[in-house]
Image: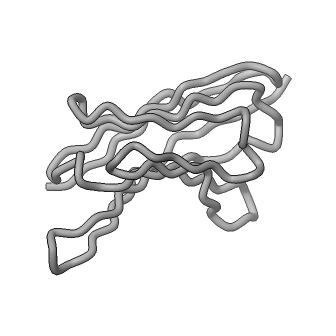
């Protein structure tokens, strides 16, 4: 059974930092591209950052220079280090895994973790 379990969310003051973690199981983690998405109340889900299976990463313009995505394949875990947090970063953050087995494309989602940036 495939699972993606996020952790690390919470309440933080503006300017603060959080590190989100997402641990995968039930699939070959190292062969999947991993991403973080977020969804704020009343808004569509948006892509925050992606890291390929080769370790190349991209960030959305809204978080560039503040957020860093990384992965540890030995631990089947992807991280999102979030610095200089702003109130507009408040959202539910979701982990996503995208990959294929040679013939079929798979996309898996975690249950989400709440991040609230407020004083």
At a point 77% along the width and 49% down the height, the residue shown is: 62
Depth order, front residue of 33/38: 33
Q: Could you tell me residue 111's position as x and y percent?
A: 42, 50
Q: Could you tell me residue 73's position as x and y percent?
A: 25, 35
Q: Could you tell me residue 31's position as x and y percent?
A: 23, 53
Residue farthest to the bottom, as pictured: 103
| Residue 93, placed above or below residue 79 | below
Tell me which corner region of the image, top left, top right, bottom left or bottom right, holds residue 11: top right
At a point 72% along the width and 43% down the height, the residue shown is: 63
Q: Is residue 65 left or right of residue 1?
A: right
At a point 71% along the width and 22% down the height, the residue shown is: 12
Tell me which corner region of the image, top left, top right, bottom left or bottom right, holds residue 84: top right
Q: Could you tell me residue 4's position as x and y percent?
A: 32, 47
Q: Quadrant of the C terminus?
A: top right
Q: Is residue 62 left or right of residue 78?
A: right
Q: In which quarter of the image is the N terminus?
A: bottom left
Tell me which corner region of the image, top left, top right, bottom left or bottom right, holds residue 100: bottom left
- Scheme of colours in the image: one colour
Depth order, front residue of 66/8: 66
Number of marks in the rendered image: 0
| Residue 65, placed above or below residue 61 | above
At a point 73% along the width and 35% down the height, the residue shown is: 65
Q: In this view, does 56 lie to the left or right of 82?
A: left
């Amino acid at each position: 059974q495939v699972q993606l379990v996020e952790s690390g969310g919470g309440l933080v003051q503006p300017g603060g930092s959080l590190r989100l973690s997402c641990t995968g199981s039930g699939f070959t983690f190292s062969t999947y591209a991993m991403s973080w998405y977020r969804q704020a109340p009343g808004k569509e889900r948006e892509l925050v950052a992606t890291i390929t299976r080769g370790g190349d990463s991209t960030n959305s313009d809204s978080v560039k220079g503040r957020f860093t995505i990384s992965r540890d394949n030995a631990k089947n875990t992807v991280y999102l280090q979030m610095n200089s947090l702003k109130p507009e970063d408040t959202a539910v953050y979701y982990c996503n895994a995208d990959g294929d087995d040679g013939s079929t494309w798979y996309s898996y989602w975690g249950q989400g973790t709440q991040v609230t940036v407020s004083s």
